[in-house]
């Protein structure tokens, strides 16, 4: 049986290769073509506030997320070719290393 975190992961998509000028509203409008979007977020650099070029879109259902992934992966949006995949839980990744660069 899947826990609620795993179920949410099936409805949440990673969206990469975004144009740095893309807004969350534009991203939501594009992905709404494939289903009911629950949330969108574009990650930004902490220091500059500039987009990091990727974000996440969450759908109401797993089926909508799958449809969006098939429909939009590889499609051009705002002059860039989108990379759309299921989002992974960061806790499953290797631990992040802190920079030892002490300018």
Image (cartoon, rainbow, N blue to C red):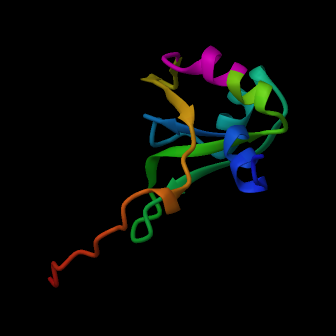
Total marks shown come to 0
Closest to the observer, 92 or 90: 92
Task: Check if residue 72 falls in the magenta segment.
Answer: yes
In the rendered structure, the answer to whether residue 52 lies left or right of residue 102 reads: right
Closest to the observer, 80 or 54: 54
* Furthest residue in direction bottom, as rendered: 102
Residue 64 picture quarter: top right
Query: Main structural element of the magenta stretch: helix, strand or loop?
Result: helix
In the rendered structure, the answer to whether residue 86 lies left or right of residue 81 reads: right
Task: Check if residue 102 falls in the magenta segment.
Answer: no
Provide the residue span drawn in magenta: 67-75
Residue at the (76%, 54%) spot, across then down? 3
Residue at the (51%, 26%) spot, across then down? 78
In the rendered structure, the answer to whether residue 8 lies left or right of residue 96 reads: right
Q: For the C terminus, which image quadrant?
A: bottom left
Does residue 77 lie above or below 2 as drawn? above
Does residue 7 lie above or below 35 as drawn? below
């Amino acid at each position: 049986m899947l826990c609620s975190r795993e179920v949410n992961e099936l409805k949440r998509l990673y969206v990469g290769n975004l144009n740095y000028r893309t807004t969350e509203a534009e991203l939501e409008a594009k992905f709404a073509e494939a289903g009911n979007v629950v949330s969108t977020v574009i990650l930004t650099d902490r220091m500059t506030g500039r987009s990091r070029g990727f974000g996440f879109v969450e759908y109401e259902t797993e089926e909508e997320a799958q449809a969006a992934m098939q429909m939009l992966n590889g499609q051009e949006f705002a002059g860039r070719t989108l990379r759309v995949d299921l989002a992974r839980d960061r806790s499953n990744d290797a631990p992040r290393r802190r920079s030892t660069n002490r300018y």
